[in-house]
Image (tube, helix red, strand yellow):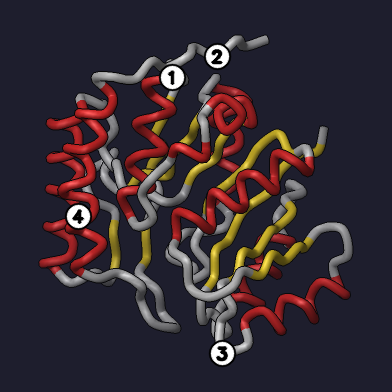
């Protein structure tokens, strides 16, 4: 069994991708990287291909045909990671809004504190978000409150995208049944893991909005999340969730 893999979905991240790769590889804990790139027209994939020669066996690239969405990129990456035999599998953005050094803390939360899914949370200790417009911050914060109310899940940052999964979580969840592609995907994965009986634990992080490149956030993503949680709740009433057999 291999150790750690961080999955980084990309679309037009040429300003950030080499810097994030080098930062992850500078960490004291070995963490390999899988970049899932949706044919970025800015040449992100070419940068990764060049770096793969410098970091053989640690940096991997999966290129997909066209822009297919965040959720499908992670599902693609999860299946790749399981097939490759990784034990701890992370989600992280390419734009440094997530501090790569916190990958170590997320892993330790699983290894030392018994979490099956560790979540880097912007709201577990108040609000720790930098450089966001006030309107976006309010929308995000109250969106998480809305999700908790509808789904009954005790997670402060339900749309968080900085996470560490133990392998058993992704083996237990039927990844082909995950239906959302935007930020509702992040909610759906947490909710499904929770319904399967896994232990979810939030740790505080400082989230810093991207300094380079263009944000992928838009109103459509928030609408998907708003209406998606109602669909999740209704579907959960008619679905059986198998409980994991942990060692």
* Residue at mark 4: 140
Looking at the rendered structure, which numbered label has been put on residue 42? 3
Residue shown at 46%/20% (left/top)? Answer: 198
SS of the residue under disc 2 = loop
Mark 1 or mark 4, earlier in chain: 4
Q: In terms of depth relative to the viewer, which is nearer, 132 or 71? A: 71
* Residue at mark 2: 244
Q: CA distance from mark 1 to mark 3?
A: 40 Å
Q: CA distance from mark 4 to mark 3?
A: 29 Å
Compared with 135, 86 (above or below) is: above
Badge 1 vs badge 3, beta-carbon distance below 8 Å: no
Residue 243 at x, y percent in the picture: 49, 12
Q: CA distance from mark 3 to mark 2?
A: 42 Å
Compared with 148, 157 (above or below) is: below
Query: Is residue 91 rendered to the left or right of residue 44?
Result: left
In the displayed orientation, state which residue is furthest to the bottom: 42
């Amino acid at each position: 069994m291999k150790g750690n893999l961080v999955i980084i979905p990309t679309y037009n991240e040429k300003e950030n991708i080499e810097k994030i790769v080098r930062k992850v590889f500078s960490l004291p804990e070995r963490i390999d990287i899988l970049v899932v790139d949706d044919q970025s027209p800015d040449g992100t994939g070419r940068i990764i291909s060049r770096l793969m020669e410098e970091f053989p066996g640690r940096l991997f690239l999966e290129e997909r045909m066209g822009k297919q969405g965040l959720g499908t990129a992670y599902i693609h990456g999860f299946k790749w990671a399981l097939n490759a035999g990784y034990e701890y599998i992370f989600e992280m953005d390419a734009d440094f809004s997530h501090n790569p050094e916190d990958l170590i803390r997320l892993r330790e939360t699983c290894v030392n504190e018994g979490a099956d899914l560790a979540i880097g949370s912007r709201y577990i200790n108040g609000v720790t978000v930098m450089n966001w417009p006030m309107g976006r911050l309010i929308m995000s914060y109250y969106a998480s409150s809305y999700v908790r109310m509808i789904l009954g899940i005790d997670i402060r940052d339900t749309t968080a995208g900085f996470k560490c999964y133990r392998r058993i979580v992704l083996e237990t969840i039927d990844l082909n049944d995950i239906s959302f592609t935007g930020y509702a995907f992040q909610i759906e994965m947490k909710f499904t893991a929770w319904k399967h009986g896994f232990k979810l634990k939030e740790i505080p992080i400082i989230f810093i909005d991207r300094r380079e490149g263009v944000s992928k956030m838009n109103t459509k993503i928030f609408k998907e999340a708003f209406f998606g949680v109602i669909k999740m709740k209704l579907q959960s009433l008619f679905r059986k969730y198998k409980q994991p057999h942990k060692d």
